[in-house]
Image: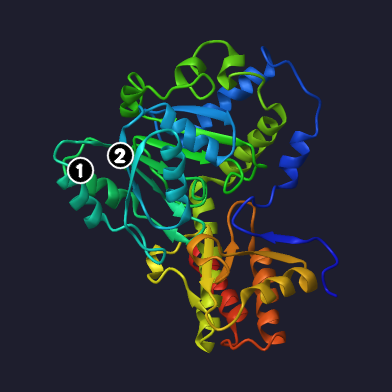
Amino acid sequence: MLAKGREILMIPGPTNVPDEVLRAMHRPAIDIRQGPLVELTDRCLADLKAIFRTETAKTFIYAANGHGTWEAALSNTLSPGDKVLVLDCGRFARGWGEIASALGVDVEVLPGSWRSAVDPDALRARLAADTHGTIKAVMTVQVDTASGVLNDIPALRRAIDAAGHPALFMVDTIASLGTAPFEMDAWGVDLAISAAQKGLMTPPGLGFIAAGPRAFEAHASAKLRTAYWDWTRRLGDEHYMKYCGTPPEHLLFGFRQALDLLLDEGLEAAFRRHAALSGAVKAAIAVWAEGGAIEFNILEPAERSASVSVFLTPGFDPAGLRRFCEEVCGVTIGGTIGEIAGQGIRIGHMGHVNAPMILGTLGAIEMGLQALAIPHGSGGVQAAVTHLADAVARAR
């Protein structure tokens, strides 16, 4: 009925691709062994270091999605039978652990909750009990898009240090890089991974790794190394081998443009934008929750991410509301997955997103709540408007 016009995609990934990025990809193929593509690769690798905030790590680009990059991180640093500790807080740290298990790695999951961040004290206690240092790596996500949680990466690093444990600290930033502060060197992260299709505003298909000195020490003796993922093979002078084969040229053209957009905005400005837009969404949810049929999945406000907001719907089936938003309004929002599948809604707000997109999405949801007679507090959109107006005023 009201869905004509440009559709709005507000899921936790893939996210909206800027028109400038799409235009950058609309060009002929070029030589893969010399000339402009070589320079483009060098610039992308250097700018990735700036975005990961590292001077000590080496960066890599893979023709792969995030799951492939998980495997690249594991195969380059571990051997069959090595033990890793996965920090549970949602679907995606567990998913990384499942990849590790399939490779023959011994995976232990540190119990956690889908409704809160990883507990640093629990991590410290588990590592302190590992007196023989059998745990070779600690694996976590900064943001889990299934639960909506934001983990305190510096606090987890301090917990590892307090236990005096030598495990590598590996962090998945797929849903956080470019949307929230991440300081690889300052926070003592040994290996970080990411992917193109969320805060980095590029179509799916590129994965990234930043590998620090301790990760490279482990790489020297890793027995899971395979030709495609292997860092050593990708570090030679031959451009072709930086991708272990034909480079994904058109994705690289798009990614270069996306990097330019992000760096022109400035990382700190991008973080402020995401914080303001996320705060607006959460202000609306808080008002809607007053009706008793909606509640935040993540209980502590400080642990809610700036990338995605997840709310549960114990008072109704969320499928009808999602269908209303898409079919009546042309707005696509996400359903919950994993342990909370079918129990709520996920609103993605990362990457190429602005205030009208957020307010339009919230307006569609609030209209759906009213049209479907779902109990909710009224004035959620107004709360979002007020939040954004206050954020703009503070920034002046």
Q: Residue at x 15, y 47 (%)?
A: 129
Q: In the rendered structure, which disc, 1 or 2, sits on the residue that comes first in sequence?
A: 1
50 or 324, which lies in front? Answer: 324
Q: Is residue 76 above or below residue 83?
A: above
Residue under label 1, please give it. 161
Residue 348 in the image: x percent, y percent?
Answer: 59, 60
Where residue 137 sits in the image (x, y, percent)?
A: 31, 38
- Looking at the rendered structure, the secondary structure element under dot 1 is helix
Which residue does the image show at 59% across and 56% down from the upper left? 12
Question: Could you tell me if residue 198 is visible in this image?
Answer: yes
Write down the residue under mark 2: 188
> In the image, is 56 to the left or to the right of 272?
left
The residue positioned 56% from the left and 22% from the top of the image is 42
Q: Of helix, strand and loop, which one carries label 2?
A: loop
Residue type at mark 1: give it: Asp
Q: Residue 280 lies in what quarter of the image?
A: bottom right
Tell whether 208 sits left or right of 360. Answer: left
Q: Looking at the image, do the residues carrying marks 1 and 2 touch, with CB atoms under 8 Å apart?
A: yes
